Structure formats: C-alpha cells, structure tokens
Image (cartoon, helix red, strand yellow):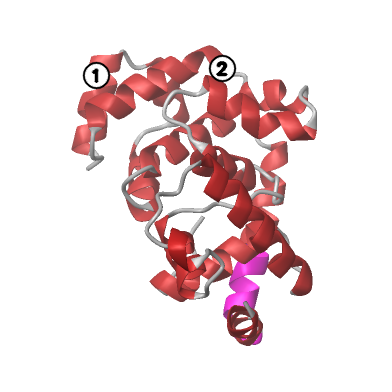
Amino acid sequence: MQKLIQEIKTLMQTKQKQTVKQRKKEFLAFKNHSNEEWFSELCFCLLTANTSAEMGIRVQKQISAKQFLSLPEKKLARELRKAGSRFYNRRANFICSARKFSGIKEILKSLPEKEKRIFLVKNIKGFGLKEASHFLRNTGNLNYAIIDKHVFNVAKENKLIKEEKESIKLNEKTYFELEKKLKKIAEKLNLTLGELDLFLWFTKTGKILK
C-alpha cells in the first residue's frame, strides 16, 4: 500500500494534478446540468462498459442527448454502429430500457446518499457497481470507487487483494472490500475516491479522461 501511496504522491507533484483538479471541477459542475445531459452521461457509462472510455466519448459526441432519449431502438442501434460502438444492439436495448428513468437527475436528488448507487444497480439495465459509481462520479458525487480492470490490476499489483484471491473475479463482495481499502488510501492523500480513481487510471493508461 505504501508504494502505491508514494506513487500517487509523486503524480500529485506533476501537471496531472491540475488535470485532475479540472476534471473534479467539471464533475461538480454537472450537478447544475439538465436532465437531458444527465441521461446522456448515463448513456456514456453504458457505452463504456466492457469497451473503453475513449469509445464512449466518441459515440457520445456523435449522438445527441435528444437522440438517446427519442430514437427507436433499431434506429439507435444503427446510429451506435455508425459511431463505432461495440455491442450496438445490446447497448441500444439498455439505453431504451433506461428511458423510463429519463428524469434521473431528479430521481437521484430525491434519494438518500446511501441509496443512490443501489437504485442505479437495481434499476438501470446494464449497470453494475462500476458503471453506477462511474455515473455518480461524473455527475458530481465523488464518494464512490470506480473499480474497472485497470484499477483492479493496480490493486492486485500492490497487494490490496490477498494473494489467494488474486485470480478471483471482481464480484460484489470483492468490490466493496477493495473500495474500503481505496477509501483509506484516498484519506491518507487527502483526495476523494473520485480523484484517486483518475490518478490510479493514469498509472495504467497514461491518460486522464472521465
């Protein structure tokens, strides 16, 4: 753990600190965005699952929030395909299914803090803990860990997961256990989990996206 903490401390002395600071500002500002923009960000998080953030960003730039909300499923699938999305039929189905929660900003606003992620996982088809945490972070809630394959690998390399568990899949139990450990690291560095994720992601990809 100490090696990882030192690595992040070193990164915090570089220009990446300003990039993370800017991303944090953008995430917090999202609280003032419209329901349409929140739904578009929900679609972005659906589009990045099992692919990449770069692909999700490209597709989100090509398909407007209104299109995500209104295109018939088959037409949306065609647009996703043209935009380069993988699993476009499945993702179109997920997006159309999520439309019943088109007022997602107001829905989440009405829920207690501890229930927001639970609600997303239970109700948004295609969302697991990682996708729900990603969406909450991008819309201004920085208190959840986004444990994707990159962060999971960093955790294994730094022995945050017991050796006998290194080959285990990232199930719900492991996710929560690791999130607690990442929270302790974030506190030592005076960072939120949302900020720590960006630094961790950079250590594996050399990029800071969203």
Q: Secondary structure at mark 2?
A: helix
Residue 34 appears in the picture as rendered: no
Instruction: Tell me the quarter of the image containing the N terminus.
Output: bottom right
Q: Above or below — where is 117 with respect to 146?
A: above
Q: Position of residue 98 (x, y in %)?
A: 47, 19
Q: Which residues are magenta?
A: 13-22
Judged left or right of residue 46, residue 184 is right
Residue nearer the viewer, 15 or 165: 165
Q: Secondary structure at mark 1?
A: helix
Q: Is residue 103 magenta?
A: no
Q: Residue furthest front?
A: 164
Residue 101: image tag: 2
Q: Mark 2 is on which residue type?
A: Phe
Judged left or right of residue 115, residue 97 is left
Q: Above or below — where is 10 with respect to 172?
A: below
* Residue matched to label 1: 75
Judged left or right of residue 114, residue 78 is left
Q: Position of residue 118 (x, y in %)?
A: 63, 29
Tell me, yes or no, whether the two marked residues, 1 and 2, touch with CB atoms within 8 Å: no
